[in-house]
Amino acid sequence: MSHSELSSPSDGPAGGTALVVGSSGIAGSALVEKLTGEGWQVLAMSRSAGAPRDNVQYVPANLSSPQSLSDALAEVAPTHVFFTAWARQDTEEANIRVNAAMLRNLLEALADKPVAHVALMTGLKHYLGPFEAYGEGDMPDTPFREEEPRLPVNNFYYAQEDELWAAAANQGFTWSVHRAHTVIGHAVGNAMNMGLTLAAYAALCKEAGRPFIFPGSATQWNSLTDMTDAGLLADHMVWAATTPTGANEAFNVVNGDVFRWRWMWQQLATYFGVEAEGFSDEPRTLEVQMAGAQPQWEQLVAAHGLAEPRLDRVASWWHTDGDLGRNLEVVADMSKSRVARFTGYRRTLDAFTDLFERYRAEKLIP
């Protein structure tokens, strides 16, 4: 088959049924939107059912329970699986045990199903190391490339890849791994949501008449970086699941542009109508800046009729602090995807502002 004959990201298989695991999260929500928009039948798996929508069947299940998965999947027959779920634990040893088991349990429950492809979302901790050894030791040079060897540390992403490869060999499906970087997209109550976190922070700053202070490190303020829009990630995962050149490969997936936070911070401040203040001397973390901000958020909710009264379901200070506080440059190379003919691109500033507009329309921010 020539490159010109390869299916495009929008070409779903006739009669295809997609199982989206972690369907209520940032990546999962974007996948459900994309797949339903393209006419797929979607099985949306999370702990609880979401709002009714056309072509979506909710499949509530506990990934840690083989019996729950067996019961949930008994009457369905997915052809394509998109795995975006994870459960953060206190140690990497526990992360490995819990998250590898979740994927293993799911794939075992699908052993007698007509699964053609499984797409697994991971991230750049593949190159940076897990939370407890993050950015320590010898890091690969930037931009990170897929052929880099694994780091000599325990990492639940590696354990998940091993589970995926073993099941693929036994069950006969193709696979893909998608290493994203700081995914921003639409979700509420997500543990790692920089987009909504920064929007909530800006709203609180504006209401209090205080500057919009960059919370991170000098390195992040000055270095090049990139990000991943959830819609682009969904495009990438569906492309790999339906395109021959996407099969049995691991890919980085980022928007395609690069920026420095010293530029982006001013753009975001301008959008929200607040005064930008950059790095000065040391990180000024959001967890410290926003400690005890729940009453102020409740005042915003009352004044603007916002939909979510709990600030901890809107903002994940710790995650944004960790991302913006890193002391190393983080940039991912997209050449492998480009050579394989994935041409998706998203300007990161547009990804932010489009997301903010959606949150405003839904009354999640003022």
Image: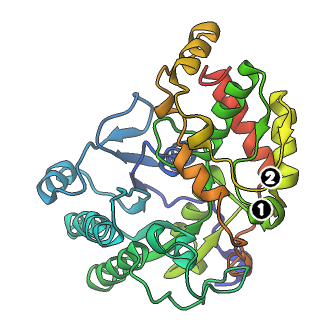
In the foreground, 319 or 343: 319
Q: Residue at x 59, y 24 (%)?
A: 364
Q: Quadrant of residue 326?
A: bottom right
Q: Point out residue 333 in the picture as x, y percentages from the top left corner.
A: 72, 77
Q: Amino acid at mark 2?
A: Phe
Gap in angstroms between the C-alphas marked 2 and 1: 6 Å
Residue 15 percent across, percent down from the top left: 43, 55
165 to 267, vertically: above or below? below
Residue furthest toward the left?
A: 67
Label of residue 101 in the image: none
Mark 2 = which residue? 279
Rendered residue at 74%/76% (across/down): 338
Position of residue 33 measured from the top left corner of the image (x, y, whole percent): 54, 42
State the SS at label 1.
helix
| Vertical order, 255 against 252 (above or below) | above
Q: Which mark is residue 218?
A: 1
